């Protein structure tokens, strides 16, 4: 997605349009380990299940109004890999919550390019632009995943996938109430609206 492609798409949205960044990730029962504080001489211990590598997948979106009036967070969790059906359902979910012209910006995942997904986007009357290959730093949702894994889930093992999904949902609800963080994610990606 070149600067020209984004500028053209943004111009076609008008003053009441919405730009939506979408990305997928996975969360494991094994927590991401981060530096921690502990009393001197007491090594912090992170309790977790033995060899469990069970995981859940998530599709997340950050939406920003062109006029700067509103930014929102969307999340859908799945206990399987993200495929065409999940992406199509997520676009339908977004359709229920977003009004007016919408520009979807996402990476080159194969599920994004399928005919069924392209048809659903056309049915909504939306546009979609693909991020350049190997450029996750341009997607603010990557920053959301980093914030979630590095702050909310760090050093805390989960006993089962249900508890893990609850923790991810709680973290998403928390970031929804922090407009400064949502604006910071967009700025960190080097973007502004």
Image (cartoon, rainbow, N blue to C red):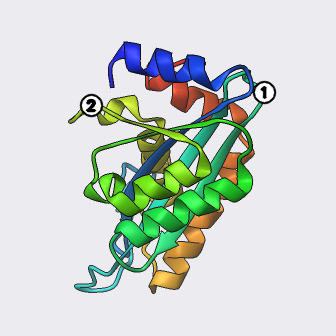
In x, y percent, where is residue 190? Answer: 44, 18
Identified at 42% across, 80% down, the residue is: 79
Identified at 72% across, 38% down, the residue is: 100
In the depicted structure, whether residue 4 falls above or below residue 124: above
Identified at 43% across, 26% down, the residue is: 189
Q: What secondary structure is marked by label 2?
A: loop
In the depicted structure, whether residue 155 falls above or below residue 69: below
Residue 193 is left or right of residue 6, and the answer is right
Residue 37 is left or right of residue 124, and the answer is left
Foreground residue among 140 and 115: 115
Residue 179's disc number: none
Separation of disc 1 and disc 2 at Cα?
28 Å
In x, y percent, where is residue 139? Answer: 41, 35
Q: Name the residue under label 1.
A: 69
Residue 39 seen in this snapshot: no
Residue 21 seen in this snapshot: yes
In x, y percent, where is residue 56? Answer: 40, 74
The C terminus is located in which quarter?
Answer: top right
Q: Name the residue under label 2.
A: 132
Point out the tag, 1 or 2, that comes first from the N-terminus: 1
Name which quarter of the figure residue 18 lies in: top right
Q: Residues within 10 Å of mark 2 (few under 14, many from 20)?
A: few
Q: What secondary structure is marked by label 1?
A: loop
> What is the tally of numbered marks visible in this picture?
2
């Amino acid at each position: 997605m070149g600067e020209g492609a984004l500028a053209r798409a943004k111009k076609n949205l008008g003053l009441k349009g919405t730009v939506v960044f979408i990305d997928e990730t996975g969360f494991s029962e094994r927590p991401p380990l981060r530096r921690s504080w502990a009393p001197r001489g007491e090594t912090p211990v992170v309790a977790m299940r033995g060899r469990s590598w069970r995981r859940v997948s998530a599709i997340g979106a950050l939406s920003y109004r062109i006029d700067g009036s509103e930014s929102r967070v969307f999340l859908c969790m799945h206990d399987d890999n993200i495929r065409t059906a999940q992406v199509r359902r997520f676009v339908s979910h977004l359709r229920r919550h977003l009004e007016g012209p919408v520009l979807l910006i996402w990476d080159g995942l194969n599920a994004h390019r399928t005919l069924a997904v392209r048809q659903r986007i056309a049915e909504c009357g939306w546009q979609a632009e693909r991020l350049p290959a190997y450029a996750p730093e341009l997607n603010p949702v990557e920053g959301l995943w980093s914030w979630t894994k590095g702050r909310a889930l760090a050093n805390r093992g989960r006993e089962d996938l249900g508890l893990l999904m609850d923790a991810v949902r709680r973290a998403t609800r928390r970031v929804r109430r922090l407009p400064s963080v949502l604006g910071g994610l967009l700025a960190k990606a080097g973007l502004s609206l």
